[in-house]
Image (cartoon, rainbow, N blue to C red):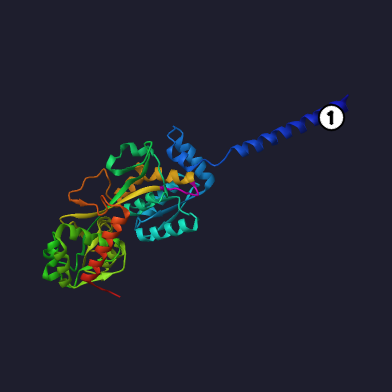
């Protein structure tokens, strides 16, 4: 009797184990990765919890950004503090760097980026080439409509998370107050001859575009008489050159770079011209994101009050913050092809009015 009961118990246990194994296999087969498009459009109350769980399983998110200085590092630090166990791997480059990298990944069909934060010409190129996944994000309900690029079904290709303003930065120990320009025409002051430098990155070409639109080609060409020096550096690097005294003054300085450095005691200040070329930075989801949960979670974070405070503390503008100067968006109303054509024209003019500094 005891031996029969024992055999029955053994057979029952074996059958139960087989059933558990069968169910486990079936469950595993059913748990296919959630498509990025589904996650990006999900609006359930458990959105954040769902994204956190998936992001922790993925372990990291690869973030491409053209934010400079300490901004992207502070944002990464804030994200990792809020979501322990999810690591950010940032790749920081100029918008041209990002474009080159993205095109190379697309051609190789080997995508590394999960989310991208950069200027609108790059994002427009990605949208035109179907490299973006439209999304919704909880904080976007409060954003003005002109700060969001609409897609279908109430989704967005990107939304503006920051604005950066280009104006004249100058070394306060080298340039007297009487020589500081109040408008583009003041760049022709005799006391500024030989002291003006332009960055040849997007910052420089966009500044030329602004001058061309608002002052005309004849004015731009007259600047050559000021012995303009050209440096193949970013806007951030140009600000550092002004601080060090290598450059006295430059109309290709971002306000946030100058003000952040000024607050730390650096001899730099910034003034707007009669119109201020504005870089709008937008956030997008890359369509082939290898880490979809972490990518979507990062997008939500970049629009959150915590992230926006980090950017505001670093003197970045936002769609919510009015400024006292007139803004000009270089790429407004243009397709990628049209913008590339105009940018090439601006770059040609820039090289014609200045001499290269080696």
Where does the image place residue 230, in percent across and percent down from the top left?
A: 26, 70
Q: Residue at x 30, y 62 (%)?
A: 236
Residue most extreme to the bottom: 358
Q: Main secondary structure of the magenta part?
A: loop
Specify the farthest residue to the top. Answer: 1
* Rendering quarter of residue 195: bottom left
Is the residue 23 above or below the residue 343 in the image?
above
Between residue 53 and residue 122, name the one nearer to us: 122
Depth order, front residue of 347/253: 347
**Horizontal and vertical percent position of residue 353:** 20, 70
Q: Quadrant of the rendered structure where residue 231 is?
A: bottom left
Residue appearing at x 29%, y 56% in the figure? 339
Q: Quadrant of the N terminus?
A: top right
Task: Tell me where residue 19 sits by quadrant.
Answer: top right
Element under disc 1? helix
The residue shown at (18%, 60%) is 212
The answer to whether 56 appears left or right of 229 in the picture is: right
- In the rendered image, residue 323 lying in the magenta stretch gets the answer no
Question: Closest to the observer: 32 or 87?
Answer: 32
Classed neighbour count for the residue bearing mark 1: other residues with Cα under 10 Å, few (<14), some (14–19), many (≥20) = few
Can I make out residue 266 in this image? no
Tell how many labels. 1
Percent coordinates x, y for residue 311 in the rendering? 32, 49
Q: Please state if 77 lies on the left or on the right of 2 as rendered.
A: left
State the image coordinates of residue 313 (x, y, percent, origin top left).
30, 49
Question: Visible in this render: residue 308?
Answer: yes
Q: Which residues are magenta?
A: 285-291
Side of 244 relative to 10 (left or right): left
Instruction: Please say if 79 is above or below 191.
Output: above
Quarter of the picture holding the C terminus: bottom left
At horizontal 47% and vertical 58% (from top left) the residue drawn is 107
Residue for badge 1: 7
């Amino acid at each position: 009797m005891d031996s029969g009961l024992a055999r029955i118990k053994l057979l029952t246990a074996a059958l139960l184990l087989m059933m558990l194994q069968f169910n486990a296999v079936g469950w595993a087969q059913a748990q296919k990765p959630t498509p990025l498009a589904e996650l990006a459009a999900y609006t359930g109350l458990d959105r954040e919890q769902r994204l956190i769980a998936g992001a922790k399983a993925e372990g990291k998110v690869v973030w491409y950004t053209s934010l400079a200085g300490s901004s992207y590092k502070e944002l990464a630090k804030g994200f990792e503090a809020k979501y322990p166990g999810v690591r950010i791997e940032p790749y920081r480059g100029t918008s041209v760097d990002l474009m080159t990298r993205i095109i190379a990944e697309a051609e190789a069909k080997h995508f590394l980026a999960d989310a991208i934060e950069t200027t609108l010409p790059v994002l427009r190129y990605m949208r035109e080439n179907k490299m973006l996944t439209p999304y919704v994000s909880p904080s976007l309900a409060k954003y003005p409509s002109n700060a969001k690029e609409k897609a279908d079904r109430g989704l967005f290709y990107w939304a503006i998370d920051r604005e950066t303003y280009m104006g004249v930065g100058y070394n306060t120990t080298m340039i007297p107050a009487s020589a500081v320009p109040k408008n583009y025409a003041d760049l022709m002051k005799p006391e500024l001859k030989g002291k003006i430098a332009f960055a040849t990155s997007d910052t420089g070409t966009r500044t030329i575009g602004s001058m061309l639109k608002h002052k005309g080609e004849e004015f731009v060409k007259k600047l050559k008489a000021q012995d303009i020096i050209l440096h193949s550096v970013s806007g951030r690097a140009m600000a550092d050159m002004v601080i060090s005294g290598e450059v006295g003054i430059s109309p290709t300085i971002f306000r946030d770079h100058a003000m952040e450095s000024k607050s730390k005691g650096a001899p730099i200040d910034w003034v707007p011209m009669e119109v201020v070329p504005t870089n709008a930075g937008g956030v997008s989801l890359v369509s082939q994101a290898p880490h979809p949960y972490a990518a979507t979670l990062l997008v939500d974070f970049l629009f959150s009050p915590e992230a926006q405070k980090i950017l505001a503390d670093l003197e970045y503008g936002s769609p919510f913050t009015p400024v006292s100067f007139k803004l000009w968006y270089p790429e407004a109303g243009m397709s990628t092809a049209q913008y590339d054509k105009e940018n090439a024209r601006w770059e040609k003019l820039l090289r014609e009015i200045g001499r290269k500094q080696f």
